Image: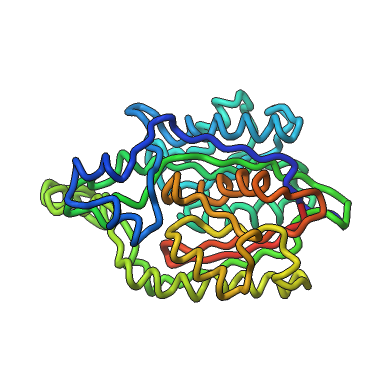
Amino acid sequence: MTRAYVSGIGFHVPDRVVTNEALTKLMDTSDEWIRQRTGICERRWAEHGVGASDLALEAARKALAAAGREAEEIDAIVYATLSPDHNFPGDGCFLGAKLGIPGVPAIDVRNQCSGFLYGLSVADAWIRAGVYRRVLLVGAEVHSSGLDVSTRGRDVAVIFGDGAGAAVIEATEDENRGIHAIELHADGRYAKQLWTEAPASKYQPRLSEAMLAEGAHFPRMEGAAVFKHAVVRMPEVVRSVLGKAGIAPEQLKLFVPHQANLRIAEAAQKSLGLRDEQVFNNIQRYGNTTAASIPIALCEGVAARGVQPGDWVALGAFGAGFTWAGAVLRW
């Protein structure tokens, strides 16, 4: 039986560190206020002129090196982002050009915080179906250039950071490795509780001076509503995929939750009955990097928790859409 497994991972974040204290010079906030509500101490923001695909390129190179592969050996690119370099074409195409692999198919996945797991499901299906043998899966974001860094936008602006993570997903016949279960969900009834309204094709013009003045081009979030759903849906979907894989929570070597809010991750851990040493969080240092958060945390978590081939790893996400997803794999 052919399965898809992670043969190499890598991540890259900008050098620029933006502390909570630095944000107090831009808006009415405090280090204590941010830490209490999010758990975040600092985040990385890219310099002007750096796009998500630039970060993705560095993460991809590291993942390829970890897998012992060259870019020319990649059969397809799956690229998850909500902050592409440009509205079109997709960032997967820009990344393919930067990697020097013309002709290799590339698709962008627009599922925000669940994007990496949605992309993982695409890569898994392609490999199990025999369409491709080796897929480069990327999550990359540059949020900093699209945030309202004023008191008006502080509830959202303090949360997000920039970064990229990548994984080489390959075919294997080893029954002791690979993805054993993936589950995806969405509920568009809550789409406007976490969204960016403009620019939008339903408006003419797509972006007006009035929209700019009211901040319609900045992300908006009803934080309490998002939190309420996330603390239920994330552990729920992880519990479901664990059941499909036929394993119990205590068998996990590592659980990596999407890094949206430390309180959400801690609530998911408690709901699943996991010990501290089974869970890895790094939102404290990077903030919410959306589609990049799981691969970045997975890279660091595998090393920090000493994950070895054959160990069970679970991933969980919840975000805008609302969308949520879970996966269980054997390393």
Is 188 situated left or right of 170 in this image? Answer: left
Is 152 situated left or right of 88 in this image? Answer: left
Spot occupied by residue 152 in the image (x, y as percentages of width and height): 17, 54
Residue 15 is drawn in which quadrant?
top left
**Residue 167 appearing in the image:** yes
Spot occupied by residue 198 in the image (x, y as percentages of width and height): 26, 52
Is 196 situated left or right of 8 in this image? Answer: left
Pick the front one: 10 or 181: 10
Pick the front one: 102 or 222: 222
In which quadrant is the N terminus drawn? bottom right
Residue visible at 60% across and 41% down? Answer: 166
Pick the front one: 194 or 93: 194
Spot occupied by residue 312 in the image (x, y as percentages of width and height): 75, 59
Task: From this view, report whether residue 145 is shown above or below residue 331.
Answer: above
**Residue 111 appearing in the image:** no
Residue visible at 34% across and 61% down? Answer: 36
Residue visible at 31% across and 55% down? Answer: 34
Task: From this view, report whether residue 27 is shown above or below residue 96.
Answer: below
Spot occupied by residue 209 in the image (x, y as percentages of width and height): 12, 46
Residue visible at 40% across and 56% down? Answer: 39
Task: From this view, report whether residue 35 is shown above or below residue 72.
Answer: below
Pick the front one: 118 or 306: 306
Residue 226 is drawn in which quadrant?
bottom left
